Amino acid sequence: MSTRTTSRTAATSATKSLAELLALPALAGATLEPDGTRDQVHVGAVVLDDPAARPEEAALLVSVAGVPDPLPPGVVAVLTRTASGDAGVPVIRIPDDRPWGEVIAALQSFISGQARELEARDALRRVLIAGLGAPGIAEAAAEVLGSPVAIVDEYLDILGSARLTDVRADALADAIEEARTHGPASLLGPFTQAGITGAHIVRLQSTGVDDLPGVLVTWGTQPAASDPALGALADALLVERRREDTRVDTEARLRGELVEELLAGEVVSRESLVRRARHLGADLSAGAVALVGRLQDPHEDGRVITDPRLIRRFMQQTRGVLELHWPKALVDWHEGLLVVLLPHRSEAAREEGPEALAHTLARRLLAATGPTVPGLTLTLALSRQQDDPERLGSAIDEAQLALSIGEKLGRAGEVVTFDETGTYKLLFQVFADRPEELEAFYEQTMAPLVRYDEQYQTELVATVSTYLDLDCNLAATAQTLYTHRHTIRYRLDRIAELAGLDIGKTDDREKLSLGLKAMRLLGRRVAPPMREKPQHGTKAARGARG
């Protein structure tokens, strides 16, 4: 395995065998003496029989007057029209009707690499004109290089491959999977360093362009760094990337305009909305479930993911999942937010219901896009099914609200639904409009318990939360907390003293329940006491006190 980075530069000389020179159309009918040297002798330059000419290594001497004696330094073969006799080097004789200018130009072009570059660019140009994309470019590259190839991008997604056996395809897939375990900082580094047995990895780059259009993996003879076909390949990939970027950007702008209108609450007629969505491949005539999502860095709270290539890769993967599991969905990336409208599917919704189907899709999205954005966390939220296309803006609002609540409740990396947010929705609106009121309500209800727990390492907050979750079942609460029932009663009495709320009264229970929700929305947490969990029924459990 070897790795090399190449750039498009001026063509540099590369030696060619006499057999390759004789295959040129300009040398049709030429003969070689002795013929057995056609594969052994290689030429790196073309020089004229001129005493003032600068000596060249591995030179082919062009001599109109026959083979000179002595030969100039560095000459390894002679091109002439006359008989050679014993020249000491191979002699190529061209027919009398072959023009010298045509022969010399063809040799110079071929040896300098121009012919190969023209051949490669012509093959790749045909692929671009035909719109065959990266897979077609890979086919052309395999033809030009004469070896199996694969082209992958900087995120190690395979753009195209040609002539790969199953064994080579599996080896490539294994190398990519291994490199992706290193996280988002550098995928190409681990990939090129580990390599693939029997393969050569070439990192392509176009001159004067920062974009890295792709990484070439070849099997067989290692391509030379000076091979002009590599520059032609890099340029073709860059053209294809920019073409795809233009198409994606155009579609994204059209989707973004529609989503932006829905988010802004603008009045969009049913007919206009359905027609515009159909132009984008989505069917919203029967309404939809809205899904929104946000990418976050779990190590940097509040960090906005702005890397355009990372976002584009994530969106490509998202569209792939949707095309497979939910065709005709509308998907967009809007100001750091994934926005998807999942059209009503009457044929499938009869059994599970549209919201249950949407929840299944959301879980698939989390699983499928996780490797796409290693090190980042994707949180998704779902609205209720909205049957009226004109009210899809409110469905997006519901999903956004559920997402915000889910993030406040520490549910990053999960799927949150609007329905499960319950009374959190009301409190969140208060939090958004009048945060001081939510803070004041928290101080009146849960703050005394939080402070007491922090000071004395007790579990009053955990007790009231568990007790309410279990419908005020004392025995179930004691079992869940591995604590004796007498201890739970003692803690409930202590809660009443500190908060001034009797959990046995309906109104006070509701206040404590809302206080817990306010505490979570405000991001307040109580660290659990640092102690081993006692076994239920033991002396330690019976003696525990809050």
Image (spheres, rainbow, N blue to C red):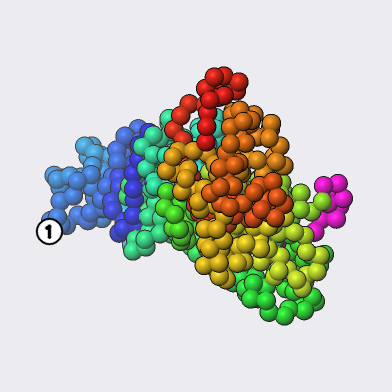
Q: Which residue is mark 1?
A: 52
* Boundaries of the magenta span: 339-352
| Residue 116 locus on image (x, y percent) | 41, 53
| Residue 324 locus on image (x, y percent) | 70, 49
Q: Secondary structure at mark 1?
A: loop
Tell me if residue 509 is in the magenta stretch: no
The quarter of the picture where the N terminus appears is top left
Residue at image location 44% in from the left, 44% down from the top = 454
Residue at image location 26% in from the left, 53% down from the top = 46
Q: Count up the numbered dots.
A: 1
Q: Nearer the viewer, residue 351 or 399?
A: 399
Q: Is residue 172 above or below residue 441?
A: above
| Residue 417 locus on image (x, y percent) | 68, 53
Instruction: Residue lying at the far top in this picture: please name it.
Output: 538
Tell me if residue 346 is in the magenta stretch: yes
Q: Nearer the viewer, residue 399 or 309?
A: 399
Q: Is residue 22 visible?
A: no
Crowding at mark 1 (Cα within 10 Å: few <14, some 14-19, many 20+):
few
| Residue 158 locus on image (x, y percent) | 53, 46
- Three-letter residue code for mark 1: Ala
Left or right: 23, with 342 as reference point: left
Q: Nearer the viewer, residue 449 or 190?
A: 449
Q: Is residue 192 visible?
A: yes
Left or right: 455, with 385 as reference point: left
